[in-house]
Image (cartoon, grey):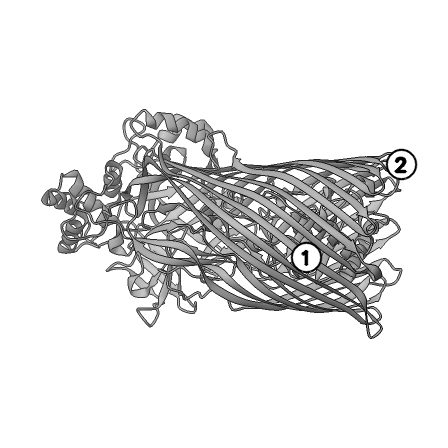
């Protein structure tokens, strides 16, 4: 999550230096004299021109009026900057191929506490996520409170460390630096209409900035406030996981499976999905920003500034899910051999095994992020040419669950066991699901079904066919506190040169906690068909899910069901607990990482000429010492239960172990920037710097964890474990930049830049095979174990050995107290001629029995991953940028293009059993904006495009990459100043309804495809 700069805040030393260096005049850079799009672009151009190093900026068009409603969406107009989106809104930024975790975001030069629980708006992979990052979420910032965004792409000794992509500084203004005394400000209101809503919902946005200074400019006060609400909806298609294995071993292949499109080699990797899903989500977001600043200047050479701010961002998502999953083995499967990793583009299973269920899991995700920040600043000109700046700040950010049951994600699984035959087609943009319904009659008690009674026998899928399965919760939270103090001394020399020294101390503490629960209701086999209607029928709505899709054509989803997962949880949790099925804690994690950072710097600025041409040099060095202390509370697992074919539950013991580990490193970071104007209006720059980025907090944890395999280990399942490493070194980058800029006309320029980054100490993964916590594995098939006896008997009977048959036979042996002959008799009685088990019998067995390891089972061998500094990479690219206004016509155009190259790309043919390393976020981008600004009328039409990029690695048991498809958005806005006081505006975002789509090793291996709709804003602003 994030920090936010809203309001009118004190500018501490480093930020003030940056303002002086980039604007040429502090007051001119912070006053808003001319308004409108052109004025905003002119100010940004002036910052770029006068800066040392490669700096880009975006400036407010007027007080309380930033160019975009979202700061991340403004930043994407800067060359080299691209963004990620949550529910269509800009959230986090990537700079020159380096993702959010590699960029430092400051507020007026201060590092601010930042937290982010990734739950709302993502695919199903986020439901059990844990908050461990440092990334800044711009979705928490109300843009109306920001005066300027500065992006420093080259390092500087005086700028805080932490970003190797860029340092992004959010700048706000101070009352005593606003021109003119008295009361002035801006109050605005907008009406938001999100076209995704099925009804005509209009949401309010209100903001205001008020500043007052006394006539003598001795005392000033500023206040800022903003309230924003957004309701929206979205339809999406997903797949939970893709299994990747050699063709000869792919899951779901049986003796009678008809395979089409088989690759020529049995060792060729192929991809097979676990399931296909359709979703419909209803989102709510409410954001509040409040900030205040007071300044006191008792004498001309001394200014005190006190500031405070509060941010709250509440988000929720109610999502319904329709799941089509496969028993295995398949009847038919078709691969596309043209793919690098051939994808199973069509799978079918027919009747003959009994009806299986169609899943309708209900999910509710809700988080609340709050940020508080308090600062005190003093700036004192202690003598001629000497200025001392002291700054202190305390900030605290928390991201917590925000639902009635205390969870960030609640998953209530229910289904209808009425599918007689089904298929899925993955050859298009989203999967096409087809199924045949067979809802045989309900049992006489009205709730509990039997092996032959699986539905309400009315020939259609409806509420009476539904039954509960399990319900799970994930409560993920993050807390980050930052206390810091800095002192900077500047010495102005003759001729415009200067010398600066400074020191900073940061005491940071990040806490991450996660608690997970699971409760068996009717179990995965849906043993109590009818309990939904009997206990909560009034909470479930039948609706047409397929009708919610506009862009994508989908399959059978005309009949679906939705309800609030938390409401259902609160009804069924006590009901099933009273029947002997308690809500068990399956995970309980607590980690704290403390960092104490001491830094000092010295920086010399030379301003002169070379060969009669203006030239500047800024050279400096920064030294940093970082001490890390990691503390963990580990609830040690008691066992890993085998619940069904490929479902496992970790049961914790309640025995808490405390672990503390430490680390330390020192780094020296030199930098030098050279700037010269070889001819009038032409600026050339050359820069070198060494920068660092600290590892993700999650890599620094002291804790260990153990997880069940994705399928029985006899059949290739892998049990994964992990442990952190608080002694990691930071990522180090040697950066080289060269650029040329031509300012050929008023408010017009073109520029080109080349950059090269050599990065070492990337965090990779070291793999160790070992046992954890003494846990035993009931799925090995080893001689002398129940699963070993089951595997042998399945082979003797000529049955298909699969996840389902192995679990069922093992559970039967367990149920018969080890009597293999009795288990064989039951198993054989329900075995079809095709070697497959009757599904109703399977469901009955898994409902009655979980397999728990005993002393005959061998120890689990976990594939334990631990982070290590073992990677390096080279990234280079170029940026082109320009803007041009056609004289006094009011028309203009601006745009940029970025190309990024690197040797840190992912290999889609990588071993699915081994973690891979790749740089996340690397992508090309461009934007172009048409502008009109004249006679009080300002208008823009902008198109922003980001190319395909890698969004994640090592997803699931097959260590799949997660790619995001290219994304282009067309936005437009028009502002009309009726007079000096009153202005009206219209804005449209994502006019073309561009969707978000992610996939695995091939574009057909869909993970997530979400439809997005335009957002429309109508606003009015009053200035005084």
Q: Which residue is mark 1?
A: 602
Question: Dot 1 surroundings within 10 Å: few (below 14), some, or many (20 or more)?
Answer: some
Specify whether residue 429 is in view: yes
| Residue at 38% across, 54% down | 865
Q: Residue at x 75, y 64 (%)?
A: 882
**Secondary structure beneath disc 2?**
loop
Q: Mark 2 — residue?
A: 216
Which image quadrant for residue 540?
Answer: top left
Whether residue 277 is situated above or below residue 476 in the rendered picture? below
**Disc 1 + disc 2, Cβ < 8 Å:** no
Of residues 753 and 192, the one nearer the viewer is 753
Residue 47, position in %: x, y? 77, 57
Q: What kind of element bears circle 1? A: strand
Location of the C terminus (image quadrant) = top right
Percent across and percent down for residue 881 are: 72, 65
Left or right of 704 on screen, residue 836: left
Q: Position of residue 544 (x, y in %)?
A: 49, 41
Residue 738 falls in which quadrant of the image? bottom right
Q: Nearer the viewer, residue 684 or 904?
A: 684
Q: Is residue 851 left or right of residue 882?
A: left
Q: Residues within 10 Å of mark 2 (few under 14, many from 20)?
A: few
Is 823 in front, or is 834?
823
Determine which quarter of the picture holds residue 796: bottom left
Q: Give residue 714's position: percent from left, percent from top.
A: 24, 54
Q: How far apart in space, not on screen, are marks 1 and 2 (Cα)?
A: 36 Å
Of the numbered discs 1 and 2, the one sitting upstream in the chain is: 2
Residue 699 in the image: above or below residue 580: below
Residue 100 relative to residue 1016: left or right:
left
If the image is split into quadrants, where does the N terminus sit?
top right
């Amino acid at each position: 999550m994030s920090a936010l700069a809203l309001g009118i805040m004190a500018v501490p030393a480093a930020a003030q230096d940056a303002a002086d260096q980039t604007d040429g005049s502090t007051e001119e850079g912070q006053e808003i004299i001319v308004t409108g799009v052109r004025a905003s672009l002119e100010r940004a151009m002036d910052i770029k021109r006068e800066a040392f190093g490669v700096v880009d900026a975006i400036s407010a068009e007027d007080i309380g009026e930033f160019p975009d409603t979202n700061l991340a969406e403004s930043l994407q107009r800067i060359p080299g900057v691209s963004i990620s989106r949550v529910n269509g809104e800009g959230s986090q930024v990537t700079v020159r191929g380096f993702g959010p975790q590699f960029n430092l975001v400051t507020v007026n030069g201060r590092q601010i506490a930042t937290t982010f629980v990734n739950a709302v708006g993502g695919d199903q992979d986020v439901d059990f996520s844990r908050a461990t990052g440092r990334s800044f979420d711009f979705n928490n910032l109300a843009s109306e409170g920001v005066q300027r965004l500065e992006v420093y792409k080259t390092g500087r000794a005086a700028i805080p460390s932490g970003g190797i992509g860029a340092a992004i500084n959010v700048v706000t203004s101070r009352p005593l630096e606003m021109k003119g005394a008295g009361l002035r400000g801006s109050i605005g209101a907008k009406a938001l209409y999100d076209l995704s809503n099925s009804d005509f919902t209009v949401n309010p946005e209100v903001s205001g900035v008020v500043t007052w200074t006394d006539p003598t400019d001795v005392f000033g006060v500023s206040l800022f406030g903003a309230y924003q609400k957004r309701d929206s909806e979205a339809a999406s298609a997903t797949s939970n996981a893709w299994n990747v294995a050699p063709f000869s071993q792919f899951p779901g292949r049986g003796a009678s499976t008809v395979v089409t499109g088989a690759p020529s080699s049995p060792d060729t990797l192929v991809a097979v999905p676990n399931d296909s899903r359709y979703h419909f989500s209803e989102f709510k977001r409410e954001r509040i920003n409040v900030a205040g600043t007071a300044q006191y200047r008792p004498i001309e050479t001394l200014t005190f500034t006190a500031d405070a701010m509060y941010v709250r961002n509440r988000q929720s998502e109610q999502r319904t899910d329709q799941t089509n999953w496969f028993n295995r083995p398949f009847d038919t499967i078709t691969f596309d051999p043209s793919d690098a990793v051939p994808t199973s583009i069509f799978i079918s299973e027919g009747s003959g095994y009994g009806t299986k269920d169609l899943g309708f899991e209900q999910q509710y995700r809700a988080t609340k992020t709050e940020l508080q920040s308090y600062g005190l600043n003093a700036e004192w000109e202690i003598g001629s040419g000497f200025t001392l700046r002291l700054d202190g700040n305390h900030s605290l950010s928390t991201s917590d669950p925000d639902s009635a049951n205390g969870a960030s994600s609640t998953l209530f699984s229910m289904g209808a066991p009425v599918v007689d035959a089904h298929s899925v087609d993955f050859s298009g943009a989203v999967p096409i699901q087809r199924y045949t319904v067979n809802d045989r009659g309900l049992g006489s008690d009205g709730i509990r079904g039997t092996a032959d009674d699986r539905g309400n026998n009315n020939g259609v899928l409806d509420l009476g066919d539904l039954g509960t399965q399990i319900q799970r919760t994930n409560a993920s939270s993050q807390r980050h506190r930052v206390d810091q103090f800095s002192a900077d001394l500047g010495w102005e020399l003759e001729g415009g040169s200067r010398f600066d020294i400074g020191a900073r101390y940061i005491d940071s503490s990040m806490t991450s906690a996660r608690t997970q629960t699971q409760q068996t209701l009717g179990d995965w086999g849906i043993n109590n068909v009818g309990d939904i209607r009997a206990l909560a029928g009034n909470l479930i709505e039948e609706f047409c899910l397929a009708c919610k899709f506009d862009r994508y054509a989908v399959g059978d989803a005309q009949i679906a069901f939705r309800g609030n997962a938390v409401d259902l949880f609160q009804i069924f949790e006590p009901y099933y607990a009273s029947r002997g099925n308690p809500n068990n804690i399956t995970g309980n994690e607590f980690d704290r990482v403390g960092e104490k950072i001491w830094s000092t710097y010295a920086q010399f600025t030379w301003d002169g000429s070379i060969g009669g041409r203006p030239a500047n040099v800024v050279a400096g060095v920064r030294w940093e010492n970082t001490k890390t202390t990691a503390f963990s509370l580990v609830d040690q697992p008691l066992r890993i239960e085998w619940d069904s074919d490929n479902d496992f539950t970790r049961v914790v013991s309640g025995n808490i172990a405390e672990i503390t580990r430490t680390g330390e490193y020192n780094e020296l970071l030199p930098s030098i920037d050279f700037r010269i104007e070889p001819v009038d209006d032409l600026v050339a720059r050359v820069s070198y710097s060494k920068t660092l980025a600290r590892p993700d907090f999650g890599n620094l944890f002291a804790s260990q964890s153990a997880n069940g395999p994705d399928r029985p280990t006899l059949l290739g399942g892998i049990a994964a474990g992990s442990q952190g490493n608080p002694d990691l070194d930071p990522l180090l980058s040697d950066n080289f930049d060269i650029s040329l800029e031509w300012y050929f006309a008023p408010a017009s320029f073109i520029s080109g830049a080349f950059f090269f980054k050599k990065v070492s100490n990337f965090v990779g993964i070291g793999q160790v095979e070992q046992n954890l916590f003494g846990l035993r594995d009931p799925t090995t098939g080893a001689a002398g174990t129940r699963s070993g006896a089951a595997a042998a008997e399945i082979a003797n009977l000529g049955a298909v050995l699969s996840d389902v048959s192995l679990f069922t036979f093992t559970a039967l042996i367990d149920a018969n107290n080890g009597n293999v002959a009795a288990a064989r008799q039951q198993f054989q009685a329900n075995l079809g001629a095709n070697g497959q088990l009757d599904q109703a019998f399977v469901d009955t067995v898994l409902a009655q029995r979980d397999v728990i390891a005993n002393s005959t089972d061998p120890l689990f061998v976990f594939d334990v991953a631990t982070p290590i500094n073992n990677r390096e990479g080279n990234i280079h690219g170029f940026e082109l940028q320009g803007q041009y206004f056609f004289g006094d016509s009011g028309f203009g155009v601006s745009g940029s293009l970025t190309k990024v190259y690197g040797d840190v790309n992912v290999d889609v043919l990588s071993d699915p059993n081994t973690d891979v390393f790749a740089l996340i976020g690397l992508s090309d981008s461009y934007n172009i904006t048409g502008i009109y600004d004249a006679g009080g009328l300002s208008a823009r039409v902008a198109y922003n495009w980001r190319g395909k990029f890698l969004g994640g690695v090592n997803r699931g048991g097959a260590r799949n990459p997660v790619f995001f498809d290219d994304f282009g958005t067309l936005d437009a806005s028009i502002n009309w100043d009726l007079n000096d006081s009153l202005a009206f505006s219209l804005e449209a975002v994502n006019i073309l309804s561009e969707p978000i789509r992610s996939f695995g090793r091939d574009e057909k291996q869909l993970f997530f495809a979400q439809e997005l709709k335009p957002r429309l804003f109508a606003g009015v602003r009053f200035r005084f």
